[in-house]
Image (cartoon, rainbow, N blue to C red):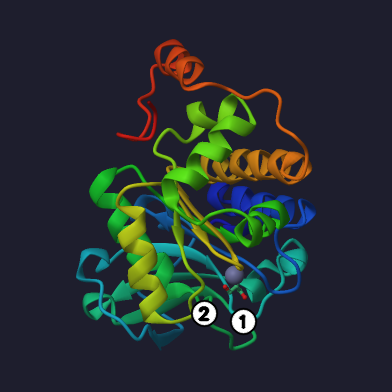
Amino acid sequence: MKDILTAPFMVEMIRTLTNMYAHGWDERNGGNVSLMLDESDVKDYLDLNAAKRQIPTGFAAPELEGRYFLVTGTGKYFKNVQYAPAINLGVVRLRDQGRQAELLWGFEDGGSFTSEFPAHMMSHVARLKVNPENRVIMHCHPANLLAMTYVHDLNEKAFTRTLWQMCTECIVVFPDGVNVLPWMLCGTNEIGIATAEKMRTARLVVWAQHGIYGAGKDLDETFGLIETAEKGAEIYMKIAHLPRLNTITDEQMHLLEKRFNVTAREGYLD
Ligand code: 2HA
Ligand code: ZN
């Protein structure tokens, strides 16, 4: 068996979580990330017949039966992952229609996966239907996106258009826009179902007064998606209280669509 701490997916996960912490997106135990793995990714690193524990998930997700996930632990700090990955992270395989998770590695202090596991797994199901390449669900608490949910209309079209107007890159990076959920109790199946529903039409879902969810094919892409939206929100929070003299017009947005071969969410541009 090879050392799982040298596996490319593990190295990338630890670097990404460390970087998310460095960006200030994951104070204390804030945030959670799940990365779907193929059996071929893990077979050289783990005995796939030696589950250490069974952890009930509290929901069913038949589409994910037999799937493997590297996931952050509940109550764990991103800050600490690089120093103690086997305590703060786990590799699980879903069984029994997604109702049980077999722990194959990690959570060595007896811990479990993130309290937002339902939102992650339901979002994976939703995104896989749109894009079979999707592998990552990422949740964190970037300050400017959060701040924006206190002072901006939560209407999804209005919220998206504002972010698109804040930097030229935004419409290119997330032409599908940003969906928004009102404040809801986190850690529940209900917010999981609501998040997954929003994930059908966009790869970014804002949780008002809480944070954001992003989805993508790999950790880099998903990090970059959130990073770009957060940059847009940062610009907004710098200018929202000032007279706006200039903007990116819808006409210019259409030029960006053509130049970068992207299609803005239907009905979002004039
Ligand atoms: O504590 O971010 O939403 C982790 C969270 C819960
Ligand atoms: Zn959170």
Report the amino acid beneath label 2.
Ser
Ligand 2 location (quadrant): bottom right
Drawn side of residue 24 relative to residue 225, left or right: right
Asked if 98 appears above or below 135 in the picture, the reply is below
Report the amino acid beneath label 1.
Glu
Answer with mark 1 or mark 2, whichever residue precedes in sequence.
1
Asked if 54 appears above or below 93 in the picture, the reply is below
Residue 162 lies, in percent from the top left, at 56, 39
Q: Secondary structure at mark 1?
A: loop
Q: Quadrant of residue 108?
A: bottom right
Give 160 or 26, whichever is nearer the viewer.
Answer: 160
Q: Quadrant of residue 124?
A: bottom left
Drawn side of residue 154 relative to residue 87, left or right: left
- Residue at label 2? 115
Residue 154's disc is none
Q: How far apart are labels 1 and 2 at the CA level?
A: 17 Å
- Residue at label 1? 108
Give 261 or 244, whichever is nearer the viewer.
Answer: 244
Q: Residue at x 62, y 66 (%)?
A: 31
Residue 100 lies, in percent from the top left, at 32, 82
Drawn side of residue 130 relative to residue 26, left or right: left
Give 221 or 41, whichever is nearer the viewer.
Answer: 221
Residue 66 lies, in percent from the top left, at 27, 67
Q: Is mark 2 within 8 Å of ligand 1?
A: yes
Q: Is mark 1 within 8 Å of ligand 1?
A: no
At label 2, counting other C-alpha atoms closer than 10 Å, the crowd grade (few under 14, some 14-19, many 20 or more) is: some
Give 92 or 31, whichever is nearer the viewer.
Answer: 31
Q: Which of pointers 1 and 2 indicates the residue nearer the eye?
A: 2
